[in-house]
Image (spheres, rainbow, N blue to C red):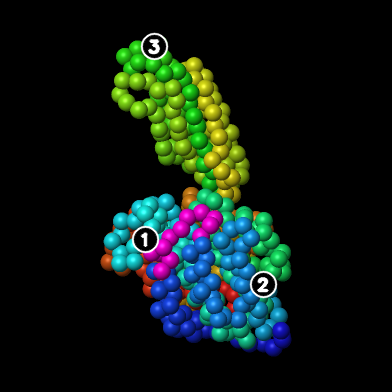
Amino acid sequence: MTDSAVAVPAGEELLAEADALMHDVVSLRRQLHACPEVGLHLPRTQHAVLSALDGLDLNVFTGQSISSVIAVLDGDRTGPTTLLRADMDALPITEETGLDYASRTEGVMHACGHDAHTAMLVGAARLLARRRRELAGRVIFMFQPGEEGAGGARAMLDEGLVDRYGSIDRAFALHVTQLVPSGVVTAKTGTMLASSDAFDVVITGSGGHASMPHDAVDPITVACELVTALQSMVTRRIPAFDPAVVTVGSIQAGTTSNVIPRTAHLRITIRAVTERSRELAIDGLHRVAAHVAAAHLCDARVRAQSVGYPATVNDDAAADHVLNAATRLVGPARVTRMATPIMGAEDWACVLQEVPGAMAFLGAAPPGIPHPAPNHSAHMLLDEAAMATGVALHAAVALS
Protein backbone atom coordinates (compact mmCIF):
# COMPACT_ATOMS: atom_id res chain seq x y z
CA MET A 1 0.00 0.00 0.00
CA THR A 2 1.17 3.55 -0.73
CA ASP A 3 0.84 6.68 1.37
CA SER A 4 -0.25 9.10 -1.37
CA ALA A 5 -3.00 11.42 -0.19
CA VAL A 6 -6.46 11.03 -1.69
CA ALA A 7 -9.38 13.27 -0.71
CA VAL A 8 -12.33 11.72 1.07
CA PRO A 9 -15.24 11.64 -1.40
CA ALA A 10 -18.09 14.08 -0.85
CA GLY A 11 -21.29 12.79 0.68
CA GLU A 12 -23.20 13.39 -2.53
CA GLU A 13 -20.81 11.11 -4.42
CA LEU A 14 -21.17 8.25 -1.94
CA LEU A 15 -24.95 8.60 -1.83
CA ALA A 16 -25.13 8.58 -5.62
CA GLU A 17 -23.02 5.42 -5.77
CA ALA A 18 -25.14 3.82 -3.07
CA ASP A 19 -28.31 4.72 -4.97
CA ALA A 20 -26.88 3.03 -8.06
CA LEU A 21 -26.48 -0.18 -6.02
CA MET A 22 -30.01 -0.16 -4.62
CA HIS A 23 -31.54 -2.62 -7.07
CA ASP A 24 -29.14 -5.34 -5.97
CA VAL A 25 -29.26 -4.32 -2.30
CA VAL A 26 -33.06 -4.42 -2.21
CA SER A 27 -33.11 -7.73 -4.11
CA LEU A 28 -30.73 -9.30 -1.59
CA ARG A 29 -32.71 -7.94 1.33
CA ARG A 30 -35.95 -9.42 -0.04
CA GLN A 31 -34.26 -12.74 -0.77
CA LEU A 32 -33.09 -12.94 2.84
CA HIS A 33 -36.45 -11.76 4.14
CA ALA A 34 -38.27 -14.58 2.34
CA CYS A 35 -35.91 -17.26 3.71
CA PRO A 36 -35.13 -16.32 7.32
CA GLU A 37 -33.12 -18.50 9.69
CA VAL A 38 -32.58 -18.30 13.45
CA GLY A 39 -29.60 -18.92 15.71
CA LEU A 40 -25.96 -19.60 14.97
CA HIS A 41 -26.42 -21.89 11.98
CA LEU A 42 -27.76 -20.06 8.93
CA PRO A 43 -26.65 -22.11 5.89
CA ARG A 44 -28.96 -20.46 3.34
CA THR A 45 -28.19 -16.99 4.58
CA GLN A 46 -24.46 -17.66 4.58
CA HIS A 47 -24.67 -19.00 1.02
CA ALA A 48 -26.59 -15.89 -0.11
CA VAL A 49 -23.93 -13.60 1.39
CA LEU A 50 -21.07 -15.55 -0.16
CA SER A 51 -22.79 -15.47 -3.54
CA ALA A 52 -23.37 -11.71 -3.25
CA LEU A 53 -19.68 -11.12 -2.43
CA ASP A 54 -18.46 -13.38 -5.22
CA GLY A 55 -16.37 -11.57 -7.82
CA LEU A 56 -15.16 -8.82 -5.47
CA ASP A 57 -11.44 -8.73 -4.74
CA LEU A 58 -11.86 -9.74 -1.10
CA ASN A 59 -10.32 -12.36 1.14
CA VAL A 60 -13.32 -14.31 2.42
CA PHE A 61 -13.46 -16.63 5.43
CA THR A 62 -16.29 -18.64 6.96
CA GLY A 63 -16.83 -19.58 10.59
CA GLN A 64 -15.42 -22.77 12.03
CA SER A 65 -18.41 -23.67 14.18
CA ILE A 66 -21.04 -21.11 13.17
CA SER A 67 -22.38 -19.69 9.89
CA SER A 68 -20.39 -16.46 10.03
CA VAL A 69 -18.68 -14.74 7.12
CA ILE A 70 -15.63 -12.48 7.25
CA ALA A 71 -14.51 -10.55 4.17
CA VAL A 72 -11.33 -8.46 4.16
CA LEU A 73 -10.63 -5.58 1.79
CA ASP A 74 -7.10 -4.13 1.68
CA GLY A 75 -6.85 -0.55 0.51
CA ASP A 76 -4.05 0.82 -1.65
CA ARG A 77 -2.78 3.09 1.11
CA THR A 78 -1.69 2.53 4.69
CA GLY A 79 -4.16 3.42 7.41
CA PRO A 80 -6.39 2.07 10.15
CA THR A 81 -8.33 -1.18 10.09
CA THR A 82 -12.08 -0.62 10.27
CA LEU A 83 -14.51 -3.37 11.28
CA LEU A 84 -18.02 -3.06 9.80
CA ARG A 85 -20.67 -5.45 11.07
CA ALA A 86 -24.08 -6.78 10.07
CA ASP A 87 -26.12 -9.38 11.94
CA MET A 88 -27.90 -11.99 9.81
CA ASP A 89 -30.31 -13.98 11.99
CA ALA A 90 -34.10 -13.72 12.24
CA LEU A 91 -36.63 -14.19 15.05
CA PRO A 92 -39.09 -16.98 15.97
CA ILE A 93 -42.11 -14.89 14.91
CA THR A 94 -44.89 -15.70 12.44
CA GLU A 95 -44.96 -12.87 9.91
CA GLU A 96 -48.22 -10.96 9.39
CA THR A 97 -47.13 -8.21 6.99
CA GLY A 98 -48.74 -9.53 3.80
CA LEU A 99 -45.65 -8.61 1.77
CA ASP A 100 -45.09 -10.31 -1.57
CA TYR A 101 -41.71 -11.45 -0.26
CA ALA A 102 -42.92 -12.39 3.24
CA SER A 103 -41.26 -15.24 5.08
CA ARG A 104 -41.76 -18.66 3.56
CA THR A 105 -40.47 -20.32 6.73
CA GLU A 106 -43.25 -21.09 9.21
CA GLY A 107 -42.81 -19.31 12.52
CA VAL A 108 -39.65 -17.41 11.51
CA MET A 109 -39.41 -13.77 10.42
CA HIS A 110 -36.86 -11.01 9.87
CA ALA A 111 -38.61 -8.72 12.34
CA CYS A 112 -35.55 -6.76 13.48
CA GLY A 113 -34.09 -5.56 10.20
CA HIS A 114 -31.13 -7.92 10.08
CA ASP A 115 -31.94 -8.69 6.45
CA ALA A 116 -31.48 -4.98 5.72
CA HIS A 117 -28.27 -4.85 7.77
CA THR A 118 -26.80 -7.71 5.76
CA ALA A 119 -27.84 -6.28 2.41
CA MET A 120 -26.45 -2.84 3.31
CA LEU A 121 -23.09 -4.28 4.32
CA VAL A 122 -22.85 -6.24 1.07
CA GLY A 123 -23.61 -2.99 -0.76
CA ALA A 124 -20.89 -1.22 1.23
CA ALA A 125 -18.41 -3.97 0.32
CA ARG A 126 -19.18 -3.42 -3.37
CA LEU A 127 -18.89 0.36 -3.06
CA LEU A 128 -15.60 0.22 -1.14
CA ALA A 129 -14.11 -2.40 -3.45
CA ARG A 130 -14.61 0.06 -6.31
CA ARG A 131 -12.86 2.75 -4.27
CA ARG A 132 -9.91 0.62 -3.16
CA ARG A 133 -7.40 3.24 -4.41
CA GLU A 134 -8.92 5.81 -2.05
CA LEU A 135 -9.07 3.47 0.93
CA ALA A 136 -6.43 4.02 3.58
CA GLY A 137 -6.02 0.78 5.51
CA ARG A 138 -8.12 -2.35 5.70
CA VAL A 139 -11.84 -3.00 6.06
CA ILE A 140 -13.14 -6.15 7.73
CA PHE A 141 -16.76 -6.96 6.88
CA MET A 142 -18.29 -9.00 9.71
CA PHE A 143 -21.46 -10.95 8.88
CA GLN A 144 -22.67 -12.36 12.20
CA PRO A 145 -25.25 -15.02 13.03
CA GLY A 146 -26.97 -15.43 16.36
CA GLU A 147 -27.44 -11.87 17.59
CA GLU A 148 -30.94 -12.60 18.91
CA GLY A 149 -29.89 -14.23 22.15
CA ALA A 150 -27.46 -16.83 20.80
CA GLY A 151 -24.28 -14.87 21.40
CA GLY A 152 -22.95 -14.86 17.85
CA ALA A 153 -20.61 -11.93 18.42
CA ARG A 154 -18.96 -13.70 21.34
CA ALA A 155 -18.61 -16.86 19.22
CA MET A 156 -16.86 -14.86 16.49
CA LEU A 157 -14.56 -13.26 19.06
CA ASP A 158 -13.71 -16.73 20.36
CA GLU A 159 -12.82 -17.75 16.80
CA GLY A 160 -10.26 -14.94 16.56
CA LEU A 161 -12.14 -11.92 15.22
CA VAL A 162 -9.83 -9.31 16.77
CA ASP A 163 -6.46 -10.94 16.09
CA ARG A 164 -6.81 -13.33 13.13
CA TYR A 165 -7.07 -10.53 10.54
CA GLY A 166 -4.66 -8.03 12.09
CA SER A 167 -5.34 -5.48 14.80
CA ILE A 168 -8.64 -3.60 14.56
CA ASP A 169 -8.52 0.14 15.18
CA ARG A 170 -12.22 0.98 15.09
CA ALA A 171 -15.54 -0.81 14.75
CA PHE A 172 -18.95 0.28 13.52
CA ALA A 173 -22.43 -1.26 13.41
CA LEU A 174 -25.70 0.16 12.14
CA HIS A 175 -29.21 -0.82 13.26
CA VAL A 176 -32.45 0.19 11.54
CA THR A 177 -35.36 1.52 13.55
CA GLN A 178 -38.90 2.41 12.54
CA LEU A 179 -39.16 4.86 15.43
CA VAL A 180 -36.95 7.41 13.62
CA PRO A 181 -37.77 9.15 10.30
CA SER A 182 -36.38 7.42 7.25
CA GLY A 183 -32.77 8.27 6.47
CA VAL A 184 -32.05 10.01 9.78
CA VAL A 185 -28.94 8.83 11.66
CA THR A 186 -28.83 8.96 15.45
CA ALA A 187 -26.29 7.86 18.07
CA LYS A 188 -24.65 8.98 21.29
CA THR A 189 -21.39 8.75 23.13
CA GLY A 190 -21.16 6.44 26.13
CA THR A 191 -23.85 3.91 26.98
CA MET A 192 -26.16 3.46 24.01
CA LEU A 193 -28.08 0.28 24.89
CA ALA A 194 -28.78 -1.67 28.05
CA SER A 195 -27.48 -5.00 29.22
CA SER A 196 -29.82 -7.96 28.86
CA ASP A 197 -30.19 -11.03 31.07
CA ALA A 198 -32.92 -13.66 31.02
CA PHE A 199 -33.94 -15.93 33.89
CA ASP A 200 -36.26 -18.84 34.54
CA VAL A 201 -37.89 -18.95 37.98
CA VAL A 202 -39.66 -22.12 39.11
CA ILE A 203 -41.89 -21.81 42.18
CA THR A 204 -42.57 -25.21 43.75
CA GLY A 205 -45.37 -25.85 46.23
CA SER A 206 -47.59 -28.90 46.59
CA GLY A 207 -50.55 -29.70 44.39
CA GLY A 208 -54.07 -30.34 45.53
CA HIS A 209 -57.79 -29.84 44.93
CA ALA A 210 -58.85 -26.31 44.01
CA SER A 211 -61.63 -26.43 46.61
CA MET A 212 -59.19 -27.11 49.46
CA PRO A 213 -56.23 -24.72 49.09
CA HIS A 214 -55.44 -25.10 52.81
CA ASP A 215 -54.41 -28.70 52.12
CA ALA A 216 -52.07 -27.63 49.29
CA VAL A 217 -49.36 -25.01 48.80
CA ASP A 218 -50.40 -22.90 45.82
CA PRO A 219 -47.44 -21.71 43.67
CA ILE A 220 -49.65 -19.55 41.43
CA THR A 221 -50.48 -17.03 44.15
CA VAL A 222 -46.81 -16.91 45.08
CA ALA A 223 -45.87 -16.28 41.44
CA CYS A 224 -48.37 -13.41 41.27
CA GLU A 225 -47.00 -11.89 44.47
CA LEU A 226 -43.47 -12.23 43.12
CA VAL A 227 -44.35 -10.15 40.05
CA THR A 228 -45.39 -7.16 42.15
CA ALA A 229 -42.60 -7.68 44.70
CA LEU A 230 -40.01 -7.45 41.93
CA GLN A 231 -41.40 -4.11 40.78
CA SER A 232 -41.19 -2.82 44.35
CA MET A 233 -37.61 -4.07 44.53
CA VAL A 234 -36.71 -2.07 41.42
CA THR A 235 -38.18 1.20 42.69
CA ARG A 236 -36.76 0.84 46.22
CA ARG A 237 -33.34 -0.76 45.71
CA ILE A 238 -32.10 0.58 42.35
CA PRO A 239 -31.20 4.29 41.92
CA ALA A 240 -33.68 6.22 39.80
CA PHE A 241 -30.87 7.84 37.79
CA ASP A 242 -29.17 4.49 37.13
CA PRO A 243 -32.23 2.57 35.98
CA ALA A 244 -33.05 -1.08 35.49
CA VAL A 245 -36.11 -2.78 34.06
CA VAL A 246 -37.39 -6.13 35.33
CA THR A 247 -40.15 -7.63 33.23
CA VAL A 248 -41.97 -10.93 33.75
CA GLY A 249 -42.73 -11.93 30.20
CA SER A 250 -44.31 -15.32 30.85
CA ILE A 251 -46.12 -17.17 33.63
CA GLN A 252 -47.06 -20.79 33.05
CA ALA A 253 -48.83 -22.97 35.59
CA GLY A 254 -51.58 -25.54 35.86
CA THR A 255 -53.70 -27.48 33.40
CA THR A 256 -57.31 -26.95 34.47
CA SER A 257 -59.55 -24.93 36.78
CA ASN A 258 -60.10 -27.40 39.64
CA VAL A 259 -56.48 -28.41 40.30
CA ILE A 260 -53.83 -26.50 42.22
CA PRO A 261 -50.57 -27.30 40.40
CA ARG A 262 -47.32 -28.18 42.05
CA THR A 263 -45.21 -25.65 40.13
CA ALA A 264 -45.40 -22.25 38.46
CA HIS A 265 -42.82 -21.17 35.89
CA LEU A 266 -41.87 -17.53 35.25
CA ARG A 267 -39.61 -16.13 32.54
CA ILE A 268 -37.99 -12.80 33.34
CA THR A 269 -35.76 -10.30 31.57
CA ILE A 270 -33.56 -7.72 33.30
CA ARG A 271 -32.21 -4.64 31.52
CA ALA A 272 -29.75 -2.12 32.99
CA VAL A 273 -27.42 0.62 31.74
CA THR A 274 -24.55 0.05 34.19
CA GLU A 275 -22.95 -3.02 35.71
CA ARG A 276 -23.83 -1.72 39.19
CA SER A 277 -27.57 -1.63 38.52
CA ARG A 278 -27.33 -4.90 36.61
CA GLU A 279 -25.82 -6.55 39.70
CA LEU A 280 -28.38 -4.95 42.02
CA ALA A 281 -31.29 -6.19 39.89
CA ILE A 282 -29.94 -9.74 39.52
CA ASP A 283 -29.13 -10.01 43.23
CA GLY A 284 -32.57 -8.60 44.02
CA LEU A 285 -34.29 -11.18 41.82
CA HIS A 286 -32.59 -14.05 43.63
CA ARG A 287 -33.25 -12.58 47.07
CA VAL A 288 -36.89 -11.55 46.54
CA ALA A 289 -37.82 -14.81 44.80
CA ALA A 290 -36.32 -16.91 47.59
CA HIS A 291 -37.94 -15.00 50.43
CA VAL A 292 -41.38 -14.44 48.89
CA ALA A 293 -41.54 -18.17 48.17
CA ALA A 294 -40.31 -19.11 51.63
CA ALA A 295 -42.90 -16.86 53.27
CA HIS A 296 -45.59 -19.06 51.68
CA LEU A 297 -43.91 -22.43 52.28
CA CYS A 298 -42.73 -22.68 48.67
CA ASP A 299 -39.31 -23.09 47.12
CA ALA A 300 -37.98 -20.80 44.37
CA ARG A 301 -35.29 -21.89 41.94
CA VAL A 302 -33.76 -19.13 39.80
CA ARG A 303 -31.73 -20.13 36.76
CA ALA A 304 -30.13 -17.97 34.07
CA GLN A 305 -31.41 -18.93 30.61
CA SER A 306 -28.17 -18.02 28.86
CA VAL A 307 -25.15 -15.76 29.08
CA GLY A 308 -26.52 -12.23 29.02
CA TYR A 309 -25.30 -9.30 26.94
CA PRO A 310 -23.48 -6.41 28.61
CA ALA A 311 -24.46 -2.81 28.01
CA THR A 312 -23.49 -1.41 24.61
CA VAL A 313 -21.04 1.42 25.34
CA ASN A 314 -19.92 3.61 22.45
CA ASP A 315 -16.38 4.92 22.52
CA ASP A 316 -16.63 8.72 22.60
CA ALA A 317 -14.21 9.33 19.73
CA ALA A 318 -15.72 6.57 17.61
CA ALA A 319 -19.27 7.84 18.15
CA ASP A 320 -18.18 11.36 17.20
CA HIS A 321 -16.46 9.95 14.10
CA VAL A 322 -19.67 8.21 13.01
CA LEU A 323 -21.86 11.25 13.67
CA ASN A 324 -19.42 13.53 11.83
CA ALA A 325 -19.32 11.14 8.87
CA ALA A 326 -23.13 11.05 8.84
CA THR A 327 -23.31 14.84 8.95
CA ARG A 328 -21.01 15.14 5.94
CA LEU A 329 -23.12 12.52 4.19
CA VAL A 330 -26.73 13.64 4.79
CA GLY A 331 -26.37 17.06 6.40
CA PRO A 332 -26.83 18.23 10.00
CA ALA A 333 -30.63 18.33 9.77
CA ARG A 334 -30.71 14.54 9.38
CA VAL A 335 -28.29 13.67 12.19
CA THR A 336 -29.22 13.73 15.87
CA ARG A 337 -27.49 12.93 19.13
CA MET A 338 -29.51 10.73 21.46
CA ALA A 339 -30.08 12.26 24.89
CA THR A 340 -30.39 8.96 26.76
CA PRO A 341 -29.76 5.26 26.18
CA ILE A 342 -32.58 2.92 25.26
CA MET A 343 -33.29 -0.31 27.13
CA GLY A 344 -32.91 -2.62 24.16
CA ALA A 345 -29.77 -4.77 24.07
CA GLU A 346 -27.22 -5.90 21.48
CA ASP A 347 -24.40 -8.42 21.50
CA TRP A 348 -22.37 -5.86 19.54
CA ALA A 349 -21.59 -4.83 23.11
CA CYS A 350 -19.18 -7.79 23.30
CA VAL A 351 -17.17 -6.43 20.37
CA LEU A 352 -17.08 -2.95 21.90
CA GLN A 353 -15.55 -4.46 25.03
CA GLU A 354 -12.59 -5.52 22.87
CA VAL A 355 -12.34 -2.75 20.24
CA PRO A 356 -13.10 1.00 20.35
CA GLY A 357 -16.17 1.57 18.24
CA ALA A 358 -19.78 2.61 18.08
CA MET A 359 -23.27 1.71 16.99
CA ALA A 360 -25.71 4.09 15.33
CA PHE A 361 -29.39 3.87 14.45
CA LEU A 362 -30.67 4.43 10.93
CA GLY A 363 -34.24 5.66 10.68
CA ALA A 364 -36.34 3.46 8.42
CA ALA A 365 -39.91 4.48 9.23
CA PRO A 366 -42.10 3.32 6.31
CA PRO A 367 -43.85 6.19 4.49
CA GLY A 368 -47.55 6.77 4.96
CA ILE A 369 -47.83 4.85 8.24
CA PRO A 370 -48.39 7.21 11.22
CA HIS A 371 -47.48 4.66 13.90
CA PRO A 372 -45.28 1.96 12.34
CA ALA A 373 -44.84 -1.35 14.12
CA PRO A 374 -41.54 -1.54 16.00
CA ASN A 375 -38.83 -4.14 15.68
CA HIS A 376 -39.80 -7.60 16.96
CA SER A 377 -43.37 -7.15 15.74
CA ALA A 378 -45.08 -9.56 13.34
CA HIS A 379 -46.20 -6.43 11.42
CA MET A 380 -42.76 -4.80 11.20
CA LEU A 381 -42.08 -2.94 7.93
CA LEU A 382 -39.23 -0.67 6.91
CA ASP A 383 -38.52 1.88 4.21
CA GLU A 384 -36.06 0.20 1.86
CA ALA A 385 -35.05 3.61 0.44
CA ALA A 386 -33.23 4.29 3.73
CA MET A 387 -30.77 1.51 2.94
CA ALA A 388 -28.93 3.78 0.49
CA THR A 389 -27.96 5.99 3.43
CA GLY A 390 -26.85 2.90 5.33
CA VAL A 391 -24.63 1.68 2.50
CA ALA A 392 -23.08 5.11 2.08
CA LEU A 393 -22.57 5.58 5.82
CA HIS A 394 -20.68 2.29 6.15
CA ALA A 395 -18.43 3.45 3.32
CA ALA A 396 -18.00 6.97 4.72
CA VAL A 397 -16.90 5.63 8.12
CA ALA A 398 -14.24 3.46 6.48
CA LEU A 399 -13.02 6.13 4.05
CA SER A 400 -12.88 9.10 6.43
Q: Amino acid at mark 1?
A: Ser
Q: Please give the range of residues in magenta.
A: 31-42
Q: Amino acid at mark 3?
A: His
Residue that mark 1 sits on: 103
Alpha-carbon span between mark 2 and mark 1: 36 Å
**Whether residue 114 is visible:** yes
Cβ atoms under marks 2 and 3 closer than 8 Å: no
Alpha-carbon span between mark 2 and mark 3: 68 Å
Residue, x 57% and y 73% (percent of image)?
Answer: 397
Q: Going from the N terminus, do you reach mark 3 or mark 1 first? A: 1
- Residue 212's quadrant in the figure? top left
Q: Is residue 151 magenta?
A: no
Q: Residues within 10 Å of mark 3 (few under 14, many from 20)?
A: few
Task: In this rendered view, identify the residue nearer to me: 310 or 165.
Answer: 165
Quadrant position of the N terminus in the picture: bottom right
Residue, x 51% and y 62% (percent of image)?
Answer: 43
Residue, x 38% and y 64% (percent of image)?
Answer: 34
Q: Is residue 355 left or right of residue 13?
A: right
Q: Residues within 10 Å of mark 1 (few under 14, many from 20)?
A: many
